[in-house]
Amino acid sequence: MKRILIVGAGGGIASALMQQVKARQLSLMTISRGNSVGDSEHLQADLSREDHIPMVREWLAARPLPDVVIVCSGMLHRSDKGPEKTLRDFDDTFFIENLQTNVLAHVHMAQAMMPLVKRDSVVRWLSLSAMVGSITDNRLGGWYSYRMSKAALNMFIRNMAIEWQRKAPKTVVVAVHPGTTDTALSRPFQANVATDKLYQPQQTAERILRIAHNVTEEDSGYLFHWDGTRLPF
Ligand SMILES: NC(=O)c1ccc[n+]([C@@H]2O[C@H](COP(=O)([O-])OP(=O)(O)OC[C@H]3O[C@@H](n4cnc5c(N)ncnc54)[C@H](OP(=O)(O)O)[C@@H]3O)[C@@H](O)[C@H]2O)c1
């Protein structure tokens, strides 16, 4: 791992990842809706928007291709609306926002990068997903928009892994469950989380980088727990 691209770089897990990348003296590229996230080669873009794809592609094309891409984009709640407890709370606008952030930001990033990936390219792609997007693991219900959008992200990752392996056999494409991490995304929902199950962003960042380091072509298309084991979709 030499050159790492972090997408959705303004968030809590992404900020910790950036610190770890810097500490390891790897070269860092970042994309965020914000105009600056610190000391990195930075592009301001909103990947939930389809019309930003060409700008992202042009920026990527002007630089060496990153060998690791970590897409951190995601949402669980808005300031005025939390995830649904029951179907009564479901509304289309909130669901569509979840799809734009939890799925389309990842799809658009892949679309921007795809033409630059050549047959001999070596790229490891990690999309931050969530265990609650696992259909097999869902025993509690609730959180309709988040669960459905993360399930869609997981399917996207499987599809993309198949397509990229045909195009560039040395690529690895995985989804990662980072574990409940103390960031703005989880803060309103931490009360019921045991203290030893609530992780600090630095700890989570180390675990994600360990997965980025360890995954091989055989792992492509799977959802990984932060401890490196595979989770059922
Ligand atoms: N924290 C946890 O407990 C936990 C658990 C399981 C999974 N995850 C997943 O891990 C990832 C990172 O989470 P985090 O805890 O670091 O969350 P966070 O601090 O809220 O960061 C989320 C990032 O997503 C991007 N984003 C948010 N809303 C967006 C919107 N409407 N349009 C476009 N981009 C938007 C932002 O990127 P920019 O502003 O930089 O563009 C933001 O930096 C997410 O995918 C999340 O689902 C987190």
Image (spheres, grey):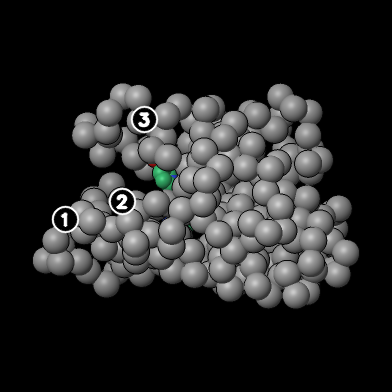
> Hey, which quadrant is residue 190 in on the image?
top left
Mark 1, other Cα within 10 Å: few <14 / some 14–19 / many ≥20: few
Closer to us: 34 or 192: 192
Instruction: Tell me which label, 1 or 2, sits earlier in the chain.
Output: 2
Distance between mark 1 and mark 2 Cα atoms? 12 Å
Mark 2, other Cα within 10 Å: few <14 / some 14–19 / many ≥20: many
Mark 1 CB lies closer than 8 A to ligand 1 = no
Location of mark 3 (residue): 198
Distance between mark 3 and mark 2 Cα atoms? 18 Å
Disc 2 on helix, strand or loop?
Answer: loop
Instruction: Tell me which label, 3 or 2, sits earlier in the chain.
Output: 2
> Hey, which quadrant is residue 30 in on the image?
top right
Amino acid type at mark 1: Lys
Question: Are the residues flagged by discs 1 and 3 in contact, CB closer than 8 Å?
Answer: no
Q: Residue at x 71, y 24 (%)?
A: 23
Mark 2 CB lies closer than 8 A to ligand 1 = no
Disc 1 on helix, strand or loop?
Answer: loop
Give the left or right position of residue 103, taking residue 149 as reference.
right
Location of mark 1 (residue): 85
Mark 3, other Cα within 10 Å: few <14 / some 14–19 / many ≥20: some
Location of mark 2 (residue): 77
